[in-house]
Image: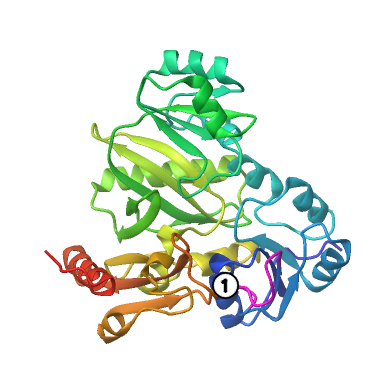
């Protein structure tokens, strides 16, 4: 008899990766009565490993470690996409992996992702795939400047990309990229950056949280405003596009689709994140369910929960730059004293500039109120006067 695809509490969720997304997924799983095993190439005591029943610490192709992990788990998911496809393929022969290798390999490679968007009929920036300085020069001539050159493989938080404004030497630019293949994208002038965080269940059902509005600083998400301050029709269109992408990938789990909202009111897909996403962290405090619960439900074969938002919210990232010293935390008193602020720290041992160490979320009766309070708390932590 074929085993049921539904995994009930008491079974073991396997998570590849030991970071904060794995930590928050593990916390939801433990709350619901599941066991958790984490496989990470980080040292013992990773953010996710601190929550797990079992933490396996080894290189991802360590045969003994992989066998130990596989013996313990009933289903496997991942908390970041930059994993070798061969690793996922080897796991898929033994245990269900959700989302699957094809979705991960599509989204971890910008070239594959852009080709997928083109094939799926999803709005995206015009692009060219380039393999050397000569092809880059030709692509710049075709697309014009400004434009953005990105590595084809493995990039996040602005890493592996260069903005070209005109007059650059393609030979110098290509050498700086230091990658065998690149994707040159036409520049998109936009009014806002928004994202849809959603989940697709094993049976194909789809549930999306309200659209978020995202503000970045130095290519890293600074704060998220939810719901986004956009017209309802734009939210509906973005949600429909996210659903189309999830279906085309035959996706199981939580994902995020990042968009540019242009000055003309049109949507352009920027990136797909095949996992829970930084812009969805507010759902832990502001929605009937949260993105990590949805991830757990989807990969366990359960029905999705209610994604409705009950309170306007603003989420603020806390980076290592805020720490007075690598092992000295800031004074959290301003956040802890606020009656509608929630502090989330990720259990990372040392602060590094640019490293995501935690976040806080502020709820409000209105978006304006939540945003004003969040900015005040952000300034208080940075010891910068508020205008």
Q: Which residues are magenta?
A: 40-49
Does residue 303 appear in this view? no
Q: Position of residue 31 (x, y in %)?
A: 56, 82
Where in the figure is residue 381, as x and y percent of width and height?
Answer: 28, 74
Residue 168 lies in the magenta stretch: no
Q: Main secondary structure of the magenta part?
A: loop
Residue at 34% across, 31% down? 188
**Residue carrying label 1:** 23
Q: Nearer the viewer, residue 167 or 209?
A: 167
Residue at left offset 54%, top offset 65%: 21
Specify whether 102 is left or right of 59.
Answer: left
10 Å crowding of disc 1: few (<14), some (14-19), many (20+): many
In the image: residue 124, left or right of residue 93: left
Q: Which quarter shows the C terminus?
A: bottom left
- Count of numbered circles on the image: 1
Q: Residue at x 56, y 51 (%)?
A: 274
Vertical placement of residue 18 versus 97, above or below:
below
Q: Secondary structure at mark 1?
A: helix
């Amino acid at each position: 008899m074929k085993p049921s695809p539904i995994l009930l509490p008491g079974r073991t969720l396997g998570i590849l990766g030991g970071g904060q997304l794995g930590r928050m997924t593990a916390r939801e799983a433990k709350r619901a009565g599941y066991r958790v095993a984490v496989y990470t190439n980080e040292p013992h005591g990773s953010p996710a490993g601190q929550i797990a029943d079992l933490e396996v610490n080894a290189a991802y192709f360590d045969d003994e470690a992989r066998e130990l992990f596989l013996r313990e788990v009933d289903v496997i998911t991942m908390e970041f996409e930059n994993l070798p496809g061969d690793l996922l393929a080897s796991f898929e022969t033994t245990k269900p992996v959700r989302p699957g290798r094809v979705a991960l390999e599509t989204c971890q490679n910008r070239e594959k992702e852009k080709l997928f968007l083109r094939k799926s009929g999803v709005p995206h920036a015009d692009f060219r795939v380039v393999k050397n300085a000569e092809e880059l020069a030709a692509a710049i001539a075709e697309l014009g400047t400004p434009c953005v050159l990105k590595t084809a493989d493995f990039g996040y938080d602005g890493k592996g990309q260069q903005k070209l404004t005109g007059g650059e030497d393609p030979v110098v630019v290509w050498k700086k990229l230091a990658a065998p293949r690149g994707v040159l994208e036409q520049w998109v002038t936009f009014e806002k950056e928004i994202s849809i965080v959603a989940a697709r269940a094993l049976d194909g059902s789809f549930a999306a949280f309200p659209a978020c509005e995202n503000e970045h600083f130095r290519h890293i998400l600074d704060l998220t405003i939810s719901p986004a301050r956009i017209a309802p029709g734009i939210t509906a269109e973005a949600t429909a596009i996210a659903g189309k992408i999830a279906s085309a990938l035959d996706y199981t789990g939580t994902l995020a689709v990042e968009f540019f909202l242009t000055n003309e009111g049109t949507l352009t897909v920027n990136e797909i994140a095949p996992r829970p996403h930084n812009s969805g962290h507010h759902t832990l405090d502001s929605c009937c369910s949260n993105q990590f619960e949805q991830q757990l439900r989807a990969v366990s074969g359960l029905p999705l929960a209610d994604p409705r938002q009950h309170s306007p919210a603003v989420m603020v990232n806390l980076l290592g730059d805020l720490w007075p010293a690598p092992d000295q935390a800031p004074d959290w008193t301003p956040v802890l004293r606020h009656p509608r602020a929630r502090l989330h720290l990720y259990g990372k041992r040392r602060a590094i500039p640019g490293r995501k160490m935690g976040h806080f979320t502020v709820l409000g009766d209105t978006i304006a109120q939540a945003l004003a309070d969040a900015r005040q708390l952000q300034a208080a932590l940075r010891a910068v006067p508020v205008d």
